[in-house]
Amino acid sequence: MPDPAIIALGVCIPVFLGLLLALRNQRRNNRVIRRRFRDFEGGEQRMFSFLHDLGQAIENEPSPSVLSRIIVEGIDKVVNARGGAVYFLGAGNGFLLPSYISEDCPPLIGIPVEVRKKASRDPRALESHLRLSRVTVDEGILGYCLIVGEPIHVEDVKSHPSFRDAFIRYTDDVAALLAPLRHAGKDLGVLVVARRHEDGGFSANDFAVFRSAAEQSSFAIGNARIHREASEKRAMEGELQNAREVQRILLPQNDPVVAGFRISGTNLPARIISGDYYDYLELGEGRFGIVIADVSGKGLPAGLLMAMCRSALRSVAPGQTSPSEVLAAVNRQLFPDIREDMFISMAYGILDEKNGKLVIARAGHDPALLFRRETGKVELLRSPGLALGVDGGSVFERVTKDQEVFLMSGDCVLFYTDGVREAVDSEDEEFGMERMSEAFRTAASLGAEAVLTRMQDELRQFTGEGPQMDDITLVAIEKKK
């Protein structure tokens, strides 16, 4: 009969060996868990470091290329990639343009056959091609990522269906992680990191981390663009304010003193820069020039053309007694430099303080209003004329004529730009000639200053809280009683 001790030992040994094997496996599992924990902890630390560096970069308002470099190099470290790149959408959103490609990044776009042949002789040809090439938004894995609109993991780039063109080939053994860059519902570009197959592929955890990093990068790039655009806008507004100040200096600083007359003018720009202008010119021998003009368009181009027009007029007006001849000379100077889509309407009058004669010529400008105190009625001064910049000379000079009027005691003349009659109310109804003439008629007997005040009050009451749509300029000439 077998010894019970031997039987017990035979039972215990397998159990002991099993326990020993389980303990060894547990230790091995513990080492794997600790290693994975250390890897996770290290990856988490790299992610925190990336986010910290990204936050600091945004505060310093870096250029797009610098921010792209920080993002690519940071994510490369987080997921242990060989390299990466950021491509931004170009103007029109038809192409992706490289903003930054890291030094060791494998090619991420197809390479034309002729470029590969050239690169076999000169490696710089490939580098130059990669850094200068623009990629259509439907080309290669970059375009594919933009089309699908979500992060993708491409285990073998050369096998991706987006590389089918026999002339645009991809031959490298590369794995890639890609994500579209989007902010506020708008596509910005594509972020990509890559590994060569010899470095090992990307894990599911790498992809998850990359996805999170790409989301943060999109937010950073979008906000950086907003800050940069705001800074550029502030700078532009500052420059426009400076230009407005220069333009303000070009306008009359005070109403002129003319024996027997009161003259008053004002300019109310719709924007920072006005395309309207008015001016007074001392011509000598008891003559005085009054000009008002309206440049087509608005903003800086109109303001620049206005300054050119003022300079040209002041250079040719002295010594001239015919307003139409002055306008013809101004037109000849300006016509070669005026764009085809721009023109200037102008009215120029020469006032003779000795006899009260006012000679007017209009270059396509609205007719001046004349209030006769004797009748209490308003007349239109409709001298014929063509706008400046429409014709080079012969037609302009044949069409544009002078008109003479003699102002009697209490008479008043109003020059204005079309921003007055074209002002609209909340129902989109224009102020119009009838309202303007009536406002002028009721205020004219009170003098030049009263005309300007009444006209502005009537306009404000008519338009209400609506925005001013066009520049408004007024000049009133009153023959003293």
Image: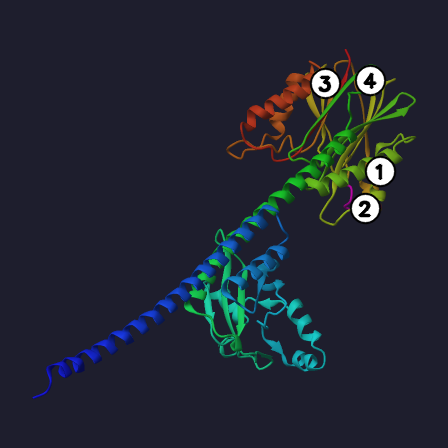
Q: Distance between the residues labelled 4 and 2?
A: 33 Å
What is the C-alpha distance between the residues marked 2 and 3?
34 Å
Query: Residue 355, image x and y in percent?
Result: 86, 18
Q: What element carries label 3?
A: helix
The answer to whether residue 186 of the structure is visible from this angle is no
Residue tagged 2:
335
Q: Disc 1 versus disc 2: distance between alpha carbons?
A: 11 Å
| 389 in magenta | yes
Between label 1 and label 2, give the one nearer the viewer. Answer: 1
Q: Which of marks 1 and 3 is nearer the N terminus?
A: 1
Q: What residue type is labelled 4?
A: Val
Helix, strand or loop for disc 2:
helix
Crowd tier of the residue under label 4, counting other residues whose Cα lies within 10 Å: few below 14, some 14–19, many 20 or above? few
Q: Which residue is drawn at 84% across and 35% down?
A: 313
Q: Quadrant of residue 351?
A: top right
Q: Considering only order in the chain, which callout, 2 or 4, is on the residue closer to the N terminus?
A: 4
Residues under labels 1 and 4: Cα distance? Answer: 24 Å
Three-letter amino acid code at disc 1?
Ala
